[in-house]
Amino acid sequence: MKGLFTAQDAALLLIDHQIGTMQLIKNILLETVRRNTIALAKTAKILNIPVILTSSQEENLQGPLIPELATLLPEAFASRIKRAGIVNAWADANFKAAVEATGRKSLIMAGVTTDVCLVYPSINAVQEGYKVQAVMDASGSPYKLSEDMSRRRMEREGVVLTATNTLMAELAQDWSSPKGSQLLQILFEDVLPKIG
């Protein structure tokens, strides 16, 4: 299963899912990004995947991280990396140290916005030998053009683009297992469009 992410080798990095910053998303429904971000947090909790949260200038227009992250992941929320203004989270020594401390080499990343918050750290992580999957429906941009250009740039550098449901299936490996069943419930309740 070379190349596939597992719960044992992955870490989840959620970058700048802040109340103010999320209002900038225009290429995808904001509610979709919010639901998928929460689904990723729930997935990590069920599978005991380490989570690194980071924010930028919470006291300014960016605002605090969405409150569901504090509720679902209280420890990760309490130890979140509050960047003073460094755009590229990977360039923040505290963020990079937190990622290294997980000991994981497969990184699941989502960021708001894709074209500023996600593109640079995902590329830098790949350049430093990490495997990176960027979850595109838990990320978004103000403009379709900047989103498209960022996706192209990430792919050129070796970042694998994915979606929440695809990643959840990859991590679950078996829907009939106890944890797989829990993930399947999240998939149908939070991620997939309502059937019927």
Image (spheres, rainbow, N blue to C red):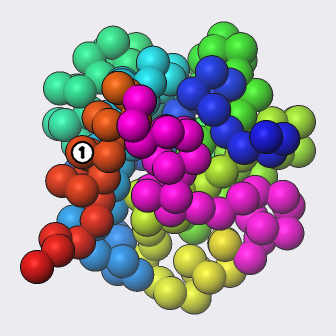
Q: Single out the residue that lies furthest toward the bottom.
A: 145
Residue carrying label 1: 185
Q: Nearer the viewer, residue 48 or 55?
A: 48
Q: Which residues are magenta?
A: 152-177
Q: Residue at x 85, y 61 (%)?
A: 157
Q: Residue at x 41, y 30 (%)?
A: 177
Residue 158 is covered by the magenta coloring: yes
Q: Residue at x 66, y 11 (%)?
A: 101
- Residue 172 visible? The answer is yes
**Percent from the top left, x then y, of residue 51?**
47, 25
**Percent from the top left, x then y, of residue 129?**
88, 36
Q: Within the image, what quadrant is residue 40 found in?
A: top left
Q: Within the image, what quadrant is residue 35 found in?
A: bottom left
For label 1, the crowd category at 10 Å Cα-Cα, with few meaning under 14, some 14 to 19 and many 20 or more, is: few
Q: Residue at x 24, y 56 (%)?
A: 188
**Percent from the top left, x then y, of residue 74?**
26, 17
